[in-house]
Amino acid sequence: MLKVTDIGKTYGKFTVLQNIDLEVADGEFLAIMGPSGSGKSTLINILGLLDQSYTGEYLLESKSYKDVNDNELSQIRGDQLGFVFQNFKLLTTYNVYENIEIPLIYSKKKQSKKHEMVEDVIEKVGLTGKEKNRPAELSGGQQQRVAIARAIVNRPKLIIADEPTGALDSKTSKEIMEIFTKLNQAGTTIIMVTHDSEVANYAMRTVYIRDGRLYNDEKSVKNHD
Amino acid sequence: MTDKIMIALKSIGKNKNRNFLTMLGIIIGIASVICILAIGDGFTHTVTKGMGSHDTRNKVTLQWESTSDYNTDGGFTANDASVLSKVPGVDRVKLASSIVEAGAKVQYKTKNISIGLNKQPKHLKLVKGTYFNMTGSSNGVYISEDLAHKLFKENAINRLISIDGTVFVVQGIYHIGDMNYRPDAYVSKQVFKDLFANQISKDQAKLYVQPNANKKQIGRTAVKRMKKMGEQKNIGKYSVSNPDAISKQFTRVLNDITYFIAFIAGISLLIAGIGVMNVMYITVSERRKEIGIRRAFGATSGDIRNQFLIESVVLCVIGGIIGIILGYILVAIINAFLPFKAVITAYALILSLSVSTAVGLIFGFIPSNKAAKSELVGLLKEE
Ligand SMILES: Nc1ncnc2c1ncn2[C@@H]1O[C@H](COP(=O)(O)OP(=O)(O)OP(=O)(O)O)[C@@H](O)[C@H]1O
Ligand SMILES: [Mg+2]
């Protein structure tokens, strides 16, 4: 699915990421763990083609998007990637249906087809009947379901999730992780950031970030410390 | 496109008060544009219609003007008329006057006074005597208070005076107010026609020309002949009077006024536009999170720019439509006071909507561009 070679990123003199090497196979479910401020969000923003200012090489499906124009980047983001952001990031003035519909606004599909796709994911995440509700009228778990529905409505190949359970209790976290597992079983590649090892257990593989460096197992992290 | 307009309407609806205040400038600007155009169009319409009914098309009017400082009496004579009727292309000639009252001399005992005199009007308020419409060759006369003072010390009623040698009986006295103009004396219609009307000098000759005749050429020939043969060529000069030129000049003045008000409307629209720009800047910075989300889910920077441009245009066009409605109301009110009818044309509506759209596009462009160019990672950090 993707291959990262020696990626680095700095803000002025401050180095956020360095020497990152990572490979993710098609259909894999990867968890990225690390303490706050270690660079997790920064890394997945690069992987999600949201941040283009980095050094090193990043190939998504064997193709580099470093020097691609904005229109093409937008199209890839809309068609192939699905994001679940930290703190849901829903539009508070839009209802559930309208929030989920957003990625479809920018794709060239028939209106009836779009409607079908939205209704389909609403059912998948268990929000049937809540279409007309605003985010403020939903629980945290329900809001995260909306965010997941929005991420998968375009049937992306790769889902990038930043702390999808960060604001949820353990029971709700479990429900959300079950949705992710189902998606992964259906063939979607998932990269998920979390600081909760129980949540990370749902993934096939876990990598660790400390101070901008990537480690493949906890032992090598301890050696670093 | 309709779904994009719906999105725009929705986010405008989110901030009704703020957006209405922003629209106010456009509403006022467009309403005044509608009023100006309605008055201008109404006036032009009335003038051109009026000219049509007077039928200046087959008529050439000659004017005689006195060149003497002492005697302004004079004009065209019956002989002049027959000379003019022989000008090639002329059907018939009618003499007319731009002056309405006749000059006459009043005599009472030893007093001798020059006055202006006219046929009696339908109604007249008297200070003395009773007013009635004198029939036939009645020798009654109504005179002004002023003339009465000059002629008699008192008791003017029923006294006999001589006007140009004919004896008249004073029937009543009227007052001439400061704001009014009235001649010094009124006689009956019939008497005026019989004795005085022919004294009014005919300073205009109307030449009715054959269809398709060259009016310019006829006018020139007529003036040339009068300069040679006109009976009063020594005390006055002849010219062609041109009603078209007068209305043209009037239209030009009106145009100047229109441009001036249009300038004012332009300034109010400029200020409105700056308001729109300001509110769009605020909207863009309030909705950084929304922009970030849309960009992450496939919106190109062009999509974002269009979204805000459409919003700005929709805002202005709503303002424009309210302005047009207000314009209709104002024009209805203005029409109650105008001597002619102001009309709102389709052109005025199209112009108003185009101007609103242009204001939205021009002043929405920079804020929309700002929204489109914002850096994505920064946008996604907004809450
Ligand atoms: N715009 C920026 N300018 C300077 N430094 C930045 C900027 N954005 C992020 N950083 C720094 O980069 C580092 C990594 O940030 P990042 O958001 O990737 O952390 P994180 O691992 O996702 O943390 P958390 O678990 O709290 O979300 C932090 O130390 C942060 O201060
Ligand atoms: Mg983070």
Image (spheres, coloured by chain):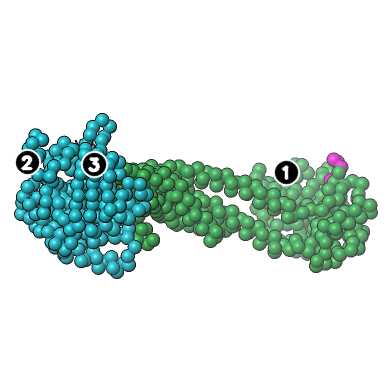
Chain colours: A cyan, B green
What residue is shown at x 71% (from left), y 45% (from top)? B145
Among numbered discs 2 and 3, the one appearing first in the sequence: 3
Magenta stretch prevailing secondary structure: loop
Residues at marks 2 and 1 touching, judged by CB atoms closer than 8 Å:
no
Would you say the beta carbon of the disc 2 residue lies within 8 angstroms of ligand 1? no
Q: Amino acid at mark 3?
A: Asp
- Please state the chain letter of the residue tagged with numbered disc 3 in the rendered image: A
Q: How many marks?
A: 3
Q: Nearer the viewer, residue A118 or A151?
A: A151
Picture quarter with the N terminus of chain B: bottom left
Would you say the beta carbon of the disc 3 residue lies within 8 angstroms of ligand 1? no
Circle 2 sits on which residue?
Answer: A219
What residue is shown at x 10% (from left), y 59% (from top)? A178
Q: Is residue B72 magenta?
A: yes
- Asked whether, in this view, residue B351 is left or right of residue B377, the answer is right
Q: Is residue A141 magenta?
A: no
Is disc 3 placed on a helix, strand or loop?
Answer: strand
- Asked whether, in this view, residue B361 is left or right of residue A7, the answer is right
Circle 3 sits on which residue?
Answer: A6
- Please state the chain letter of the residue tagged with numbered disc 2 in the rendered image: A
Residues at marks 1 and 3 touching, judged by CB atoms closer than 8 Å:
no
Q: Amino acid at mark 2?
A: Lys
Is disc 2 placed on a helix, strand or loop?
Answer: helix
Picture quarter with the C terminus of chain B: top left
What residue is shown at x 32% (from left), y 43% (from top)? B375
Q: Amino acid at mark 1?
A: Asp
What residue is shown at x 24% (from left), y 41% (from top)? A7
